[in-house]
Amino acid sequence: MRVHTQQSDLTPSSAQDGPGSRADSAAAAETPYRYTAALAGEIEARWQERWDAEGTFHTPNPTGALADGADAAGEPFFIMDMFPYPSGSGLHVGHPLGYIGTDVVGRHHRMSGYNVLHAFGYDAFGLPAEQYAVQTGQHPRVTTEANILTMRRQLKRLGLAHDPRRTFATTDSDYVRWTQWIFLQIFDAWYDDDAPRPDGGTGRARPIAELVAELDAGTRAASDGSVWSELDDVQRRRLLDEHRLAYVSETPVNWCPGLGTVLANEEVTVDGRSERGNFPVFKRNLRQWNMRITAYADRLIEDLDLIDWPEKVRAMQRNWIGRSEGAQVRFEVIGGQEIEVFTTRPDTLFGATFMVVAPEHPLLDEVPAEWPDGTHARWTGGHRSPVAAVATYRAQSAARTAVERQADTSKTGVFTGHLALNPVTGQPIPVFTADYVLMGYGTGAIMAVPGGDERDFDFAQAYELPVVHTVAPPEGHEGGAWTGDGLVVNSAGPELSLDGLDVPSAKAAIVAWLEERGIGTGTVTYRLRDWLFSRQRYWGEPFPIVYDEHDLPIAVPESLLPVDLPDVPDYSPRTYAADDAHSTPEPPLGRNLDWVDVELDLGDGPRRYRRDTNTMPNWAGSCWYYLNYLDPSRRDVVVDPELERYWMGPHHNATSGASGGVDLYVGGVEHAVLHLLYARFWHKVLYDLGHVSSMEPFRKLFNQGYIQAYAYKDVRGQYVPAAEVVEDEAVASGFTWDGQEVFREYGKIGKSLKNSVTPDEMYEAFGADTFRVYEMSMGPLDVSRPWDTRAAVGSQRFLQRLWRNVVDEVTGAVVVTDSAPDLETARLVHRTIAEVRTEMDAMRFNTAIARLIVLNNHLTGLAQVPREAVEALILLLAPLAPHITQELWERLGHAEALLRTPYPVADPAMLVEETVTCVVQVQGKVRDRLEVPPSIGDAELTELALATAGVQRALDGRAVRTVIVRAPRLVNVVPV
RNA sequence: GCGCGAGUGGCGAAAUGGCAGACGCGCUGGCUUCAGGUGCCAGUGUCCGAAAGGACGUGCGGGUUCAAGUCCCGCCUCGCGCACCA
């Protein structure tokens, strides 16, 4: 037997009876007004044009250029999609899922009286657009604009109710100007840890001019101990540059030769490759731009409690920031040096029986020439001297990639010859180097407590080092490290005893002791690093920065913004062999010397400067685009404060709370620690500097699921067109293509997987409304689900039946009756209204659609469809299927836009039922049912229930012990 | 290892502790049709039964309860994220 699989049948009735076929002309002649894909397409195009022409989706601002209609506006509600990269490969059916979801929410809110801001834009800078341009040999601006047009056309067919006046791309010159302006705000700011904030917290960004004023006045001392009044201009600039929130520094960065650019930590995968393109990434010391996101680490964690985000995403951000509390402790090394360690368990200091430093640790630049007397044979690695042992171990570690080092959890290392003094016991302890300690975390050195840390214990076992338990393990704990709670033991020294304390008290006691002695401090360490912000690519915002003869950065004045991208003949990045770790970044902007060398008058007459040739990462544009939707036409401010307060401010509507922000932000989970972290950071800087009143950019985040699909490979592992695969029981896999066996896998949709279905194909075969309803009916919006084109006919049948309930397919006449619906129908209508409202509010569109189908099926069964009933159904369905509902609405004689018609409200009186079904159980199993009045009493219901045939049969003569009654819905008889 | 989430028909999925499988796809039968398709009607968890009816059934094992997909305890499997983070 052979039948078609899901993807294979892209041609339902309407498309099969396509133009030209005899059957179609016959069918079309019989039923010219049937709701086919062709008629749906005609209706959809017509209404879309009209909505455009009439400005139906225009959203009024309270003031300013876009204020038309503001007097009639309801409560503000700001809804957003994560805007897309216009990538050039076009859309597949998975892409619009979230856009349809937000459109349904937006339309529903509009019909519920809200003033809904919903706009759409394009994140058009960055690697994907640039890679596509390089491949096609065209300028990125050309390909980007073409791609935007394609996407816009594909999305327009969906009928999304976006305000067209507010659309833009991050590459627009007007937008770039403000992106650069915000960069300069960050550049011209420093973080004052002690400054109070309007929200009651402490610590905020302040303009750098205020720092200068305080230094000038002598009310603040320079942080590095230098005396401000004695510094010359250049020294002063260097000092200020150290404080800026955007700063240049030479640090280890992620260099990706295959892409020809450096990357942020967030853009490098766990296995050390670029997230885009999957090229190897190498750590290199390079001079690059950074943003001081670490200054905001605590606020980025704390304020997660203010916002309504999925716990998963909040956990990912907390994890990424990686805050850990502990202490830094200095250990004296015999012979004069010092090692500073970070530990989260200062209470275990008495159990520190050795130390370990990372192979890259500077302590190892100098090690003793001889092994100390009595050095354990196992510690030397067979080398004659510490110098040889350390050099060999360092070389071995350097040869391994970070991935290899982390994959191998066996403990290797070598004694450095150094001995350090444990500050509480006064005992000398050996210092090892081992690659399980990482230079990039903490101080790159640890105090090893094998009694309280499993890794240290493993190492101690391998090198026969002593193990001291400082927290009493529970009864039955065999050897090994004890990392749990308990009472402190073995921790008494000449000056201090922690014995008998619990772990938190011991921590407090030891930190106090260390601080008193000046050998340690309680501190907090983060995994988060500052954000590497420069890229050596063409397609991004140029830095609004020039350098003078001192090679120090100077802000380009606001009046000269935007700094546009120069038209270079060759915009392709200078890339290298993917594994060429020693290559050097070469920004394409550096090739245009006329642009790089510039004469400017910055207040002291015209002088020559050199422009910064880096560009910003594409995250820059997505860090603040929500603010631009508020009014892209403004020229004078980054965002009008009044508009920001209205749309985003704290308590701007009933649900927005103290944090404020966009009311609903929908997008995939993949940006959890990239865009969403960066945007929160920028927003907080803007908040500190007084440009916005909201503390967070996105108050509620919703992660939509992904649409996935089956793909099929043949025996050679090549993908075959999924649409042509047939089920075939004759082969083991159950599937064949072109007569040969193929194998099914499940995952992403993609052109290369040959399982892609485009929205255009869906419009062609079903129309946009069917496509919308189908995507929303497949399951909850936040759950991933497999695509099944064939199943969309269910949604089409639903809309077709609705159409037929109003319009005669042969004559086109409206067939509804104006007489009132019967009581059963009226009750169903109101019950449906109540249920659908609940489902819509909770964004459970799949179950809302199910309720609507039930009502529609009921109406289909009536001899004549009452107007009142079908009009309620049309209004309820309007956010999901805006075109067909608007068309029917008009045919039913209504002139106004459905979008401005109130969403139906159920009449409570109609929700009361005459009789209800009472379930009669025996021992919890349903044995009978009764139709009873809702007001029935317990006693009467019990009597009725006991008398039912089902109960008598199930009791089979047994006596009744108790009867549980939940009138009027349930009776449960419990026999003895 | 840690964190988050999920396991329910052939498939997508529904179920304030109170009728498991709403709704849709698919499938089966019927009506309409020269015919296919569309449309309409009926059926469709598994097993026993002609039927009435009954037994079983929400990953596995326990528990609480008159009553458990739902609550509690212990496991298993899968997905996602993090991970030698001191």
Image (spheres, coloured by chain):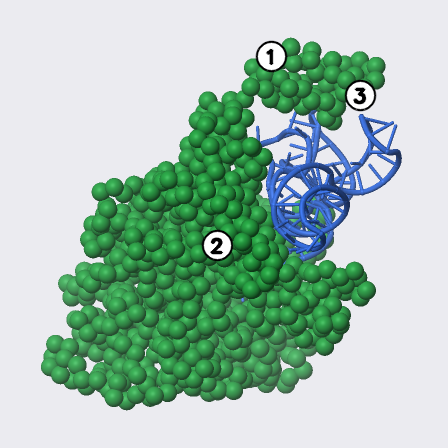
Chain colours: A green, B blue
Q: Around disc 1, counting alpha carbons within 10 Å, would you say few (fewer than 14), some (14 to 19), or many (20 or more)? A: few
Mark 2–mark 3 distance (CA, rounded to whole Å): 57 Å
Q: Are marks 2 and 3 on the same chain?
A: yes
Mark 3–mark 1 distance (CA, rounded to whole Å): 24 Å
Q: Nearer the viewer, residue A245 or A369?
A: A245
Q: Residue at x 60, y 61 (%)?
A: A22
Identify the element where label 3 is drawn. helix
Q: Residue at x 32, y 73 (%)?
A: A541
How many marks can you see?
3
Q: Is residue A481 left or right of residue A250?
A: right
Q: Residue at x 65, y 49 (%)?
A: A473
Q: Position of residue A81 (x, y in %)?
A: 41, 56
Q: Nearer the viewer, residue A464 or A538?
A: A538
Of circles 1 and 2, the one toward us is 2
Q: Which mark is residue A937?
A: 1
Identify the element where label 1 is drawn. loop
The residue singled out by tag 2 in the image is A39
Q: Mark 1: which amino acid?
A: Gly
Q: Is residue A740 left or right of residue A96?
A: right
Q: Is residue A91 left or right of residue A106?
A: right
The residue singled out by tag 3 in the image is A954
Of circles 2 and 3, the one toward us is 2
